[in-house]
Amino acid sequence: MIGYVKIGNVNIERTAALAPMASVADSAYRLMCREFGAAYLVSEMISAKGMVYGDKKTPELCAIDPAERPAALQLFGEEAVYVGRAAYMLNGYAPDIIDLNMGCPVPKIVGNGSGSALMKDIPRAADIVRETVKNALCPVTVKMRIGWDAEHINAVDFAKAMEQAGASALTVHGRTRMQFYSGKADWDVIRQVKEAVSIPVIGNGDVFSAKQCEDMYNATGCDLVMIGRGSNGRPWVFQQVRHYLETGELLPEPDVQQRMKIMLKHAALACKFKGERQGIKEMRHNFAWYIKGLHGAAKLRARSGELNTLDDLRLAAEEIIAANRGEENG
């Protein structure tokens, strides 16, 4: 039987959660993953300063659909005073959890002293956690990496300091900042963090299948597994995880027709939230993920810039189905 992990007062099923992914994990994406059984969802990154200074795009990032819960809103920032103020403002959106991004490796974020740059400044990171906890009406968690580079793997010390500062849980991506998303995630360091703290630890990195999810639970002892890139164009991975953990049986990948049906449902949701023009524009990279590995994918990817309407996407889906007809049986 599948159990639960408790983060503060929030119960989360111990299957798999959706990782926060900038410009990917928007409302439509999150709802698709929830439909397939994602246990917990985290928003795209929200700039603390953007929140405080009233950036026009920020409210869209903060909206939580009732169907998404339990869900977290993720803040990033390098100054405790701004992150604390932003956390106070986020209370108005009633997140179940506020997650602090201390793991993003992108130069634009790191260059400002945010994201994984905070792995190099434990006192500053701890101040940010304390200030957020003081202002939030919900549990506060931290998403981190294992260190800055191979010579500075400080995940255990960092994790202990975040726990002491008041974090209710930690998500550990098993790579250094300098690895970005290359190389292999070090699950052993995730295990070391789990053994060093008493709060829940969520494992993240190199989980693309139900079997790998089980492997991460076994190898690290983590309380929950988080899937990011493994869900790109594959929201059904969460259903596969749940089914496998319950029964030991591996579910097959959906056939091409099912895959395109799911993709079009995702696109319709994106259009509902953002309007057809913007929704389809943002669906282009998702479409490329949904068709990855299929016949005709390369040709359609090259033409993805021509996709402007839901009808364009429907025609492209039909083209993929036609190109793959008979392949799955023969």
Image (cartoon, rainbow, N blue to C red):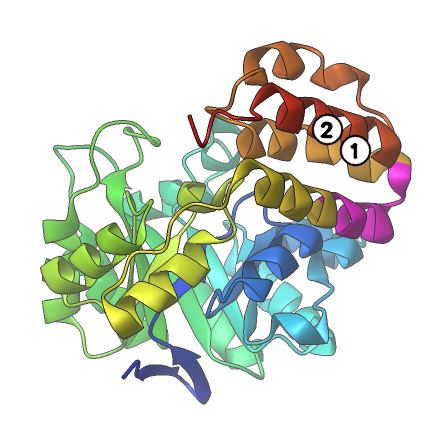
Amino acid marked by disc 1: Arg
Q: Is residue 201 visible?
A: no
Residue drawn 66% across the image and 15% down it = 300
- Few, some or many residues within 10 Å of mark 2 (<14, 14–19, 20+): some
Q: What x and y, as percent, mark residue 309?
A: 87, 31
Query: What residue sits right under mark 2 in the picture?
Result: 318
Query: What residue sits right under mark 1 in the picture?
Result: 314
Distance between the alpha carbons at the discs numbered 2 and 1: 6 Å
Q: Indicate which label's residue lies in the foreground, 2 or 1.
A: 2
- Few, some or many residues within 10 Å of mark 1 (<14, 14–19, 20+): some
Q: What x and y, as percent, mark residue 234?
A: 50, 45
Residue drawn 81% across the image and 54% down it = 54
Q: Is residue 189 left or right of residue 77?
A: left
Report the magenta stretch's main SS. helix
- Residue 207 part of the magenta-drawn span: no
SS assignment at label 2:
helix
Q: CB under 8 Å between callouts 2 and 1? A: yes
Q: Residue 76 carries which label?
A: none
Q: Nearer the viewer, residue 93 or 310?
A: 310
SS assignment at label 1:
helix
Quadrant of the image for the C terminus? Answer: top left
Above/below status of 165 relative to 293: below
Image-quadrant location for residue 323: top right
Q: What x and y, as percent, mark residue 74?
A: 55, 59
Amino acid marked by disc 2: Glu
Question: Which contiguous range is marked in magenta?
Answer: 267-276
Residue drawn 70% across the image and 30% down it = 317
Above/below status of 214 relative to 135: above
Q: Is residue 49 left or right of residue 41?
A: right
